[in-house]
Each structure stands twice: as structure tokens, then as C-alpha cells.
Image (cartoon, grey):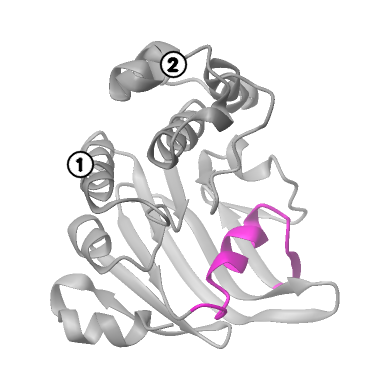
Amino acid sequence: MTELLKFNEVVAGYGEARILHGVDLAIESNERVAILGRNGVGKTTVVNTFLSSARLMQGTVELAGQRIKQLRYFTAARHGISVVPQGRRIIPGLTVRENLLLGAAVDRQGPWNLRRVFELFPILAERADTPGTALSGGQQQMLAIGRALMANPALLVLDEPSEGLAPVIVDELVQVLSDLAREGIALLLIEQNLSLVQRVAKRYYVMAKGTVVESGDLAGLTTEGLKQHLVV
């Protein structure tokens, strides 16, 4: 399998503050992986590092098998990694359609286009000319996922995708992510929702104080074992 994302002894942070301390992790094609841990342990900084929002201080980052010496905000997308960020970050002043088209700006070839996204999320087709920020929370999450898919990713990274969503919407999200995984898109979840993690991911990393302290198969981890890593 191809390693889509790999961290080797990564030290990263903001300004002079170091948040990640020697992080090692890897996600291969077709994998479903979760990063677990209490709030403030550095999970989102993992994402911010390959998006260049956090500064890579030491170690190496590999995207699609290539060691990247100089990370830029568009580097990950060009290498097939799309991110659904925490808080969704729908662009104010743009319609649903326009927000989706932003995702295609990287110009990667693949099966995802407006028609496919509208088939996956019919409500977005119905509200295509509505301002994206006028959607409900669940619909905005659909829009954020659709926008990420427009870049035709090999790996879809979701940072706290269930945050603020009703349980029935989380159930729909589980179904969507499972369908995407069956289509061959690898998934990396940064998530606190036990049910979502257990129903979608197959492998996990646990972070504490900016480093990976445990990893393994979710099949071998009990609910109680999982809970101890997710308590705020």
C-alpha cells in the first residue's frame, strides 16, 4: 500500500512554542484511522503541520510517498489530501455552489464534481444558490465534506466532524464516511465521539502532551479503554 501521509519524529508548533514532540504516524491508502486524545494534546496541530499553519521545526513529513521539505497551504491538496476543518470554515458571502467550487481549485483529476457531490448530498443541490453560512450545522458539515471531495482526494482528513451535530445527523455522517471508504478514499478522523470512531475507524493513535503514546487496532480496544483517551 501507498503511504499517503507519514510523520517521522515531527516537532512542530507556533512561533517558538513546541506543541508536537517527536510524532510518528502513518496513514496508508484505503485505511480508516482515528487520532484520539484529550483536548489540548496536539491533535489539531498534526493537521496544521501538513497544512503549514503550524511550523515544522524538526523531523520530516511525507505526502503520497514524497518527502516535503517546504510545506505550503496548498501542498497537501496537490498531493491528494483534503481537510474538513474543525468549525467547517464555510466562506461567508459565497453560495453553496461557490463554496464547493473552491474545493476544485487545486485541479486534481478524479470522479468528484458538482454532480457527484449533489448526488451524495441532495440538500446541497436544493440549496445550491443559498449562502453557505445560512445552512444548518449539519448541512454546513455536508458542504465542508463536499468541498473537500471536490479536490478528488486520496485521503480525507476530518477534524472533529461531529462537533455540534445532533445524534441523527451523526448517524448520517457515519453512513457517508463508510460509503466514501468503500469507494477507496482513506479517512483520518480527529474525533471525540465514541460511536462515530468505533463505527468508522479501524486503527487508532492516542496522543498525550504532544506525542503519540499508543496505537493499534480499534477491534482490540474496548469501549471503556477508548473512553479513557477521550475524557476532556
Cα distance between the residues tagged 1 and 2: 22 Å
Query: Which amino acid type corresponds to the residue marked 2 in the rendered image?
Result: Arg
The span shown in magenta is 39-58
Using a 10 Å C-alpha cutoff, classify the residue at mark 1 as few (fewer than 14 neighbours), some (14 to 19) or many (20 or more): some
Residue 102 visible to the viewer:
yes
Secondary structure of residue under mark 1: helix
Residue 111 visible to the viewer:
no
Percent of width and height locating residue 102: 62, 24
64 up-or-down from 163: above or below: above
Please check the rendered image and state whether residue 55 is part of the magenta-colored stretch, yes or no: yes
Query: Which amino acid type corresponds to the residue marked 1 in the rendered image?
Result: Gln
Using a 10 Å C-alpha cutoff, classify the residue at mark 2 as few (fewer than 14 neighbours), some (14 to 19) or many (20 or more): some
Residue 127 badge? 2
In the rendered view, does 191 fall on the left or right side of 96? left
| Quadrant housing residue 26 | bottom left
In the rendered view, does 54 fall on the left or right side of 113? right
Residue receiving disc 1: 175
Q: Number of marks in the image?
A: 2
At 59% across and 36% down in the image, what residue appears? Answer: 90
At 57% across and 72% down in the image, what residue appears? Answer: 8
7 up-or-down from 76: above or below: below
